Structure formats: C-alpha cells, structure tokens
Image (cartoon, rainbow, N blue to C red):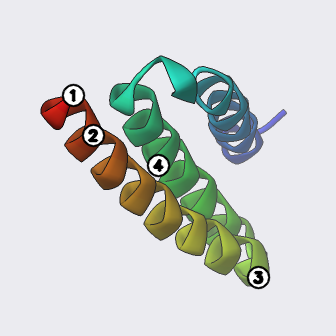
Amino acid sequence: MDPLTLFGLLSVTLMLGFYTFEHRGPGYVLAFAVACAMSSTYGFLQGAWPLGAVEAIWVLVALRRWWTARSKATHA
C-alpha cells in the first residue's frame, strides 16, 4: 500500500469515527470537518477531482454545523 492510499484510508476512517461521535460536542464536528478536508485533499491528489470537490463541499457543511453547535453550546 503506497503512502497516498494510506492517507486516504486514514482520512475516511477519521471521518467515520468523528461523525459517530458528533453528538458528544462541537469539537467532534470540527474534527469531522478537518477529516473531510483530508479526504478532499486525497481525492485531488489521487486524481479523482469529483471526490475532492464533493468532500470540499462537506467541509463547508461541517464547518457550518460546527459553528451552529458551538453557538448553542456557548449559550446553553
């Protein structure tokens, strides 16, 4: 397995893990966004630009969810 494939495996594994724990707090939502950015980077580096583009959109969605969750946690 080459380093790029390992990076891709790590990024999607982290995405799954952090997504599973998002209900525990905004930090996990932010970590999910970072893992999505890693997956997007992998997609572009691997040459699968549609994957890279979709994962980049997920980064924006996750950051929006983090911002909302953070606001709720601060005002709770």
What residue is shown with label 4?
33
C-alpha separation, residue under disc 2 versus residue under disc 3 = 33 Å
Mark 3 or 4: the one toward you: 4
Residue 6 lies left or right of residue 44; in this view the side is right
According to the image, label 1 marks what residue?
76
Going from N to C along the chain, the mark reached first, 2 or 3, is 3
Name the amino acid type tagged 2: Lys
Which circle marks residue 50 in the picture?
Answer: 3
Of marks 2 and 3, the one in the foreground: 2
Q: Secondary structure at mark 1?
A: loop
Direction from residue 75 to residue 32 in the image, left or right:
right
Residue shown at 75%/35% (left/top)?
9
Q: Which of the two residues, 11 or 4, is positioned nearer the viewer here?
A: 11
How far is disc 3 from disc 4 in space, using C-alphas? 18 Å
Query: What residue does disc 2 label?
Result: 72
Q: Amino acid at mark 3?
A: Pro
